[in-house]
Amino acid sequence: MRENKPKSRLLALSSAGALVTATLIAGAVTAPAASADSSRGQDREALGAATAAARAAKAGIDWQDCPADWGLEKPIQCGWVSVPLDYAKPNGKQIKLAVDRIGNTGTKQERQGALIYNPGGPGGSGLRFPRRVTTKSALWTNTAKAYDFVGFDPRGVGHSAPISCVDPQEFVKAPKADPVPRDEADKRAQRKLAREYAEGCAEHSGAMLPHMTTPNTARDLDVIRAALGEKKLNYLGVSYGTYLGAVYGTLFPGHIRRMIVDSVVDPARENIWYQANLNQDIAFERRWKDWQYWVAANDAAFHLGTTRAAVQEQWLKLRATAAKSPLGGVVGPAELISFFQSAPYYDSSWVPVATAFSKYVAGDTQALVDAAAPDLSDTAGNISAENGNAVYTAVECADAKWPTSWQKWDRDNTRLHKDYPFMTWANAWMNLPCATWPAKQQNPVEVGTHKGLPPVLIVQSTRDAATPYAGAVSLHQRFKGSRLITEEGAGSHGVTGLVNPCVNERVDAYLLTGELDSSDVSCAPHATPKP
C-alpha cells in the first residue's frame, strides 16, 4: 500500500502468477514499554532495542553526499545506521539501513528536530522524502522550515539488506494468468505458483524472513531516532506506515514527540493481515465505481458511456478481449488490473487511466499496451519492483498467522468475488504465499495507549480503497487523546499529499505548534480531477 503508485498491489500482480532507542537520560538506558501480554522473548527484544539504540546514539550517522545512482540531489545527504537482525540478540548479526536527510530550511531557532517518514508498502522506500524540499513542494514549505526531513529504506528494502524471492526479470514477465479462475485447474495452478513463490523467498532470503516483521521495523525506527541524536521522534506515516506508527506508538510511547498517520490500516489483531485484504476487496469495488461514475459524467472527454453501467460494460468487454488474446501479446487481465487499479487508489490516476482506456476504445491499442505492459529494459526498476513485492509478502506473512486451509481461502474469496469482482481474486493470489510460508509467523502487537503517548493526529478519507475508513476509527479508539480529521466523500489514498486547506492547515499547525482541534474535524473533499 504505497504512496505515489499502488505498487504493493501493482507489483504483486506479477507475483504468484497473479499478479501491501532508547531514550538516553543522564546516561541511563530506558527499555521500551512492553504491552501487558509481552512474552519473555518480547522483553528480550525490548532490551535489545534499548541496547542497539544506545549504541546508535553514541555512533551517530556519518553523513556524506548520496551515491550518484540513488537519484538524490545535493544538499540531501545519505548515511547508514546499523541495527541487529534479531533484537533478541543485539550483539549478533547486524544489518545496515540506508537513511537520508535534508536540514531544515529555517533558522537554527526555528528548528524543531527531525521528521521521519514512511510511505507504506510494506516495501516502500522513504528516501525520496527529502526531495519534497529540493523540489519545493508547496504543501511542505512551512514544515520544512522547522524540521530536517529524514527518509529511510526499511529492513529488506532497497539499499537496506534487500531481500528477493525470484529473478526480477522473470517477476515482471507478461502476460500472467488471468487472476479470476475459470475452474479448479486454474485454482490449482495459482496455488502452485504461490507455493513456489514462498519457496523462492526461503531460497533467496531465508535468513532474513523470520525477522521481517513490523515490530522489528518499529525497533529500527527507534534506533534511527537515537542515531539522529533525537530524544523523541517526529513521525509521518502513510498507508502501511500508519501500522508501523501504531506499533511504534505501542512499543515506544514515551519516545514520541509528534506523530501523524494518514490513510490508516486497522491495527486490530484480528485484522492483520488476512482480514485486512478481504476488507480491501470490498473498498476497492466501491472506489472503482466512484471512478466509473466520474468517467460517465465526463463522457464528452472520454466517450466511454454516459452511465456507470456503460463504462463497466466497456471494461468487461476489454477484459474479455485481453483474456482471449493479450493486447500486444503482453497485456492480459492481470496486467489490466495492475494498471486500472491505480484509479481507485489515487485520484491523480483518474485522467491518465481514463485517457488510455478511451484511446483503446477509439481504436488505439498501443497507448494501453504502453501504459500496462512491463518494461523489460528497465532492469533497475524491475529489481526494485521485485524487491518491493518480496518485502510486502515477507512482512505480511511474518507479522501474523495466516489460514493454512485452502478451503477457507477458496470459500472466502469465492463469496466476495460475487459482489466485489474487481480485485478479489488478484488480491487472494498475491497473498496466498502466506498460507505456506516457510518461516515463523508471529502474533500481531496489541496496539493501544501506554504511559507517555502524546496526542496523535489521524487523517483519513471516507472512501479510501486501500485502507478503509474503519481503520482510522479503530486506531482513534486505541490511541487515547488522538484527533481524527476526516475528509468526507473523498477516497484518494494519502490525504496529506493533496491540496485541501482544511487538512493542510491543521497538519502544519500540529507539526509546528503541537496544536490540535478540541474535537474531531470533518473536511469537505479536495477538488475532483478535471479531464
Image: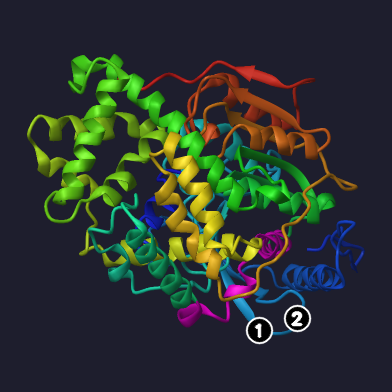
Foreground residue among 345 and 312: 312
Give 334 or 145, whichever is nearer the viewer: 334
> What residue occupies the far left of the structure in this picture?
363
Asked if residue 257 can be seen in this view, the reply is yes
Q: Is residue 415 above or below residue 43?
A: above
- SS for callout 1: loop
Density class for disc 2 (Cα within 10 Å; few <14, some 14-19, many ≥20) is some
Residue in the image at 47% along x and 31% along y: 492
- The residue identified by callout 1 is 93
Q: Is residue 206 left or right of residue 230?
A: left
Residue 245, image x, y percentages: 68, 49
Front one among 152 and 290: 290
Residue 9 spot, x, y in % from top left = 42, 50
Q: Identify the magenta region.
A: 202-227
Which residue is found at the position 55% from the left and 65% from the top?
435
At which x and y percent is residue 218? 69, 59
Where, quadrant-wise, is the C terminus in this rendering? top left
Element under label 2? loop
**Circle 2 sits on which residue?**
89
Vertical position of residue 25 compared to residue 140: above or below: below
For the residue pair 425 and 79, the one nearer the viewer reads as 425
**Quick check: 444 left or right of 176?**
right
The kind of residue on which mark 2 rests is: Lys
**In the image, residue 112 lies in the stretch drawn in magenta:** no
Question: Are circles 1 and 2 on residues that touch, CB within 8 Å?
Answer: yes
Q: Is residue 472 left or right of residue 157?
A: right
Residue type of the residue flagged with mark 1? Lys
Extreme residue toward the bottom, this view? 92
Residue occupying the point 37% across, 40% down: 342
